Amino acid sequence: MKTDTALTLHAYAKINLTLEILAERDDGYHEISSILQTISLADVFSFELSERIQFDCVTSGSIRADLIENTVLKAANLFKRETGCPNGATIRMESMGIPRSAGLGSSSTDPAAVLKGLNQLWGLNMAPDELRGIASKIGSDTAFFIEGGTALAQGRGENIQTLPLLPKTWIVLLHPSITPTPNKTANLYGLLDSSHFSSGDLTQRLLNELHNSIQLQPYLLCNTFECVAFSFFESLNEYRNSFRAAGAKNVHLAGAGPTLFTLVESEAQGEAMVNRLREQGLGAQLARTV
Ligand code: C5P
């Protein structure tokens, strides 16, 4: 039974403002340089002390609750092992606001929220760096979500440097109805070759601008996966065309996709664009940076 004392945490989604792939590594991963940004879409978790670790979640439609449960329980059990804490916890997903396997980081932000929630619930007071150390054993993007905000990710994505927060920026997301493919991220990395690799200069250019606290401009964004995603996801180009027809001047890919996004100048402009897309039966949503 949920009580009023339950600890509640938002697990925010992300977009990559830049995502450059620099080289292939000996361990099968790729060296990246990416500026990540959390956005207002969120899965909401609650945590309560209990004897053992358990997870409750209600999902709708085609969402595989067992996959989410697996991710959450793996993170909780890893955290318990790493810390040696004898406590248990009931973890609930109260609202699922992030589409799965969409390039928005759902499978990384959820385990990060579990680590942060258990750290707080069990009174362990572990520092963000220690939590990031555990998070990086879960997935390349998980460490970023320990603090979220605006950050530079290097290495395979687990080396995080927190950056000055961007001024609030509105974003319209277009969610293509494309069936998620297993191992999507690995498959997209597999389609890249050395001709797609870059030096990290585009990320450095945005880094320089962020220190001047500028409003984000589309020309500063880049994502190497755009070189392969529009052939990997068959109908993605049609979604991009519809997005442009609805007024999106610059369309960007979120992570490894297939979600597309565009920057808008105001909440009102974003709402109008979302309405135009929805009138065509497309899944669109307004979000802001957090
Ligand atoms: O770390 P994560 O489990 O999210 O990565 C999924 C897959 O994506 C990896 O197995 C690897 O094939 C690929 N990957 C990569 N380079 C990275 C991150 C992920 O090649 N920096």
Image (cartoon, helix red, strand yellow):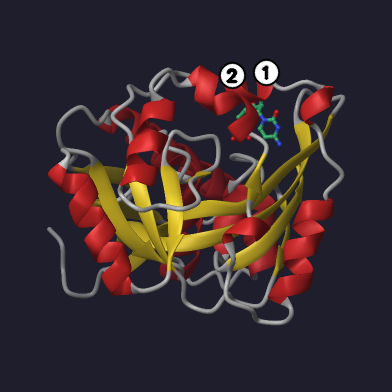
Q: Is residue 7 visible from the viewing direction of this image?
A: no
Question: What secondary structure is found at the residue carrying circle 1?
Answer: helix
The location of residue 218, given as percent across then percent down, is: 58, 59
Say which residue appears at 52% left-offset and 56% top-offset. 85
Q: Which residue: 41% across, 33% down? A: 101
Badges 1 and 2: C-beta atoms under 8 Å apart? yes
Task: Give the residue type at disc 2.
Answer: Asn
Residue 201 in view, yes or no: yes
* Rendered image quadrant of residue 259: top left
Q: Position of residue 24 (x, y in %)?
A: 83, 27
Q: Quadrant of residue 229?
A: top right
Mark 2, secondary structure of its residue: helix
Relative to the observer, which residue lies in front, 122 or 44?
Answer: 44
Name the side, left or right, on which 141 lies relative to 74. Answer: right
Q: Residue at x 35, y 29 (%)?
A: 67
Q: Is mark 1 within 8 Å of ligand 1?
A: yes
Residue bearing the label numbered 1: 190
Taking the spot 74% from the left edge, 78% from the top edge, the residue there is 211
Query: Is 169 situated above or below 180?
Result: below
Instruction: Report which residue position mark 2 lands on.
Output: 187
Determine whether 279 is above or below 270 in the image: above
- Ligand 1 falls in quadrant: top right
In the foreground, 222 or 5: 222
User: Which quadrant does the N terminus fall into?
Assistant: bottom left
Would you identify the image quadrant in which residue 161 lies?
bottom right
CA gap, disc 1 and disc 2: 5 Å
Residue 246 picture location, percent across and down? 30, 49
- In the image, taking residue 135 as reference, residue 249 lies left or right, namely left
Q: Is residue 233 above or below residue 288?
A: above
**In this rendering, is residue 64 above or below 6?**
above
Q: Nearer the viewer, residue 180 or 138?
A: 180
